Image (cartoon, rainbow, N blue to C red):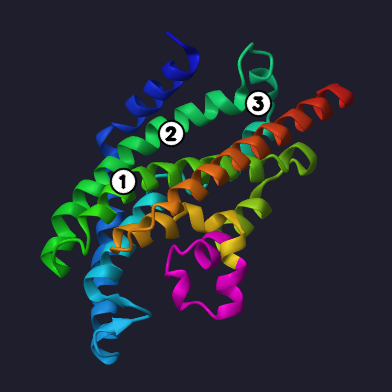
Amino acid sequence: MNPYLAAFVSGMRRTVAPGELIVRVGFYAVILVVFAAVWNAAMAANGGEVAGYGFAGILWYIAAAEAAQVATNARMIEDIGNDIGNGTVAIELLRPVSVVGLRLASEVGGAVVRLAGTCALAALFVPLAAGPPPSWNGVGLAIPSLVLAVCCNLAAQHAFAGIAFWLEDAKSAWFLYQKLIFLLGGMLLPLELLPDAMSGAARLLPFWAMSYAPGRLMAGYVEPWLLLLQVGWLVAMVGAAVAVFSSGERRLQAVGG
């Protein structure tokens, strides 16, 4: 079997374990319930609409934006940093395959399983809480956008984690990355609700491709160009991750690691 396909299948099998998947989906359920209550109160206080989003639109937005994040390993940057620090990655670099490609294939395999679980829960809960999606065309675009969002996120985490080749610790990179996702990725709020300067800055950075894009599409805004931009950012993030690991490999060779 192709090593990347084998890594993808292995990631899926590892994530199918009931305990891990149940915890993830259960956490996602809590998020949906809490945000449904918060936004129901917010909409009631603002005439039923905020920045162009009605209650149904905003809840579907949250369902997609949060699903894209819950599907990934939130502490993966720190885990990769630990693998770099303890020599695991140095051993993997001896294999005749791309370390980044193999790790990404495994992580994407696991993320696809988690994404399926969260989307199934959203399909049951959100219609009961807020009604059907505002646009089925938007849903059709949001599904591939969710996959692209997860892949962009995983690639970016590998790029950030590469700092451990030089600092031997990726905790600071993990902390910074999470804050950028929260604030500029649209994970908690659509970018339209941010101050103009912050929203403008967020649209120039890749983090919006990891939550905002699928959320915006799921909220009923049929904007297919968002997928094209996500593809562009995915290529850029994979390229950045490969470049960082290649540079890190050269450093290990230079210092005899």
Quarter of the image that includes the N terminus: top left
Of 219 and 42, which appears nearest the observer? 219
Q: Is residue 231 above or below residue 195?
A: above
**N-terminal-most mark, 2 or 3:** 3
Residue at mark 1: 143
Among the 4 quarters of the image, the one containing residue 125: bottom left
Label 1 neighbourhood size at 10 Å, few (<14), some (14-19), many (20+)?
some
Q: Percent x, y for residue 102?
A: 54, 23
Q: Which residue position holds label 2?
A: 108
What is the spatial separation of the Cα atoms under label 1 and label 2, in whole angstroms?
15 Å
- Apparent side of residue 178 relative to residue 219 in the rendered image (left or right): right
Badge 2: how crowded within 10 Å, few (<14), some, or many (20+)? Answer: many
Residue drawn at x 49%, y 14% as measured from the top left: 3
Q: Residue at x 39, y 52 (%)?
A: 224
Mark 1, mark 2: which one is toward the viewer? 1
Which of marks 2 and 1 precedes in the sequence?
Answer: 2
Q: In the figure, is residue 227 to the left or right of 197?
A: left
Up the image or down, 200 lies above or below 237; here it is: below
Answer whether residue 94 is magenta in the image.
no
For marks 3 and 1, give the one nearer the viewer: 1
Labelled disc at residue 89: 3
Query: In the rendered structure, which amino acid carries the disc numbered 3?
Result: Val
The local secondary structure at tag 1 comes to helix
Single out the residue that lies furthest toward the left. 128
Q: Earlier in the sequence, mark 3 or mark 1?
A: 3
Considering the numbered disc 3 on the image, is that residue within a helix, a strand or a loop? helix
Disc 2 marks a residue whose amino acid type is: Val
Over which residues does the magenta segment extend?
180-201
Q: Residue 48 or 113: which is nearer the viewer?
A: 48
Give the residue drawn at x 61%, y 24%: 99
